[in-house]
Image (cartoon, helix red, strand yellow):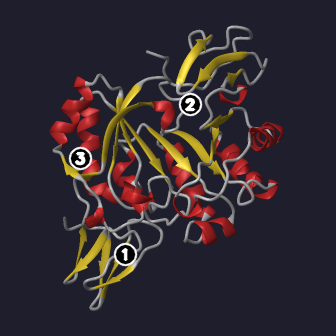
Amino acid sequence: MQVAWCYDSDTEIKCNLCILRCKIKNGKRGYCNTRENRDGKLYNTIYGKLSSFSTDYIEKTPLYHFYPNHKFLTIGSIGCNLRCRYCLTWNITQVPPEEVDADELSIEKIIESAKKLQCRGIVYTHSEPTLNIEFYTPLMKAAKENGLLNVFATNGYITTEAFKLIADHLDAVALTIKGNENFYKKICGVNADFKHLQKLIEKIKDKDIHLEIVNVIIPRYNDDKESLTKIIEITKNADAPLIFLRFFPSHKMDQLDSPSEEILEKALNLAYKKGLKYVYMENIYSHPGKNTYCEKCKNQLIKREGYGIIEWKINNGHCPFCWTKIPIIGEPP
């Protein structure tokens, strides 16, 4: 599909979908490998293509404060504008689109499936969802018209001008921030732009879109105090929950070990020490760090195992012990 997020010149096209703003010569593709210059016109080579289609609990996104334990239709497309060496879905994000076995489903079929499966909404994930913005935008609009919620799991490299196209249709964002400047350059293959991420967070908050920050902890790469403090400060400024994901060996970092519980606990404790109100550990079946505690009286309000909730004590959006307002949208079904 021909797209509009570009600027033409005589010899190349500048794509303005993400902050890399690739200048693409005729017959070539951008860094994401999904945008192609065909005789001076920019095309989205993955329009309408889906590499994954399933149902999952919202906690798998991950989101912990947004319609907890509700089932969502989870879809993924192809491609990414980062080259993370540890990507779990590298076989759909780090290869040419032509090598991915993908299906093409109509917007009507996707909406129909979500409703038949009794999903609360749609999560756009597994690949970088903003790359298929031309297809996802009308899909998100149709979802809203049918009473479904829209959730993006993104790396945040979409430009603020492109974000305007989807902002009115978004209900929640799981924003993954990778590490410090060196981590982005060496492990993700791009330059870090924390000023942009801050601006994007402001746009998300201004639109009253629910936000949670995600960070994958990789031992010896981004588990140092300096790196963690950077993530924690961004999250604190955003007044959002922070979810630390346990790294699993994959792709070009498959020889590394997953972080121990002790490493995750140190990150969790540092975040609380620096003033975060809600911090979690994920990719671990059972641990106190998965639970929700009242920010004021510290009583346990939610107990989790896996992606499930086994205890829920929140009463009408408040802590039953001290009546503090708990910033969680929705209750378990």
Mark 3 or 1 closer to N-term?
Answer: 1
237 or 188, nearer to the observer: 188
**Residue shown at 25%/83% (left/top)?**
27
Mark 2 or 3 closer to N-term?
Answer: 2
On-image quarter of the C terminus? top left
Question: Farthest residue toward the front?
Answer: 255
- According to the picture, the residue beneath numbered tag 2 turns out to be 64
In the rendered image of this protein, does residue 183 appear above or below residue 163?
below
Image coordinates of residue 205 in percent, x first then y, are 54, 43
Mark 1 or 2 closer to N-term?
Answer: 1
**Residue shown at 79%/38% (left/top)?**
275
Q: Nearer the viewer, mark 2 or mark 3?
A: 2
- According to the picture, the residue beneath numbered tag 1 turns out to be 30
**Residue shown at 59%/12% (left/top)?**
312
Marks 2/3: CA distance?
27 Å
**Residue shown at 39%/47% (left/top)?**
167
The amino acid beneath tag 1 is Gly
Query: Quadrant of the rendered structure where residue 79 is?
Result: bottom left
Q: Secondary structure at mark 1?
A: loop
Q: Which mark is residue 278?
A: none
In the rendered image of this protein, does residue 222 appear above or below residue 107?
below
Image coordinates of residue 156 in percent, x first then y, are 50, 56
The amino acid beneath tag 3 is Pro
- According to the picture, the residue beneath numbered tag 3 turns out to be 138
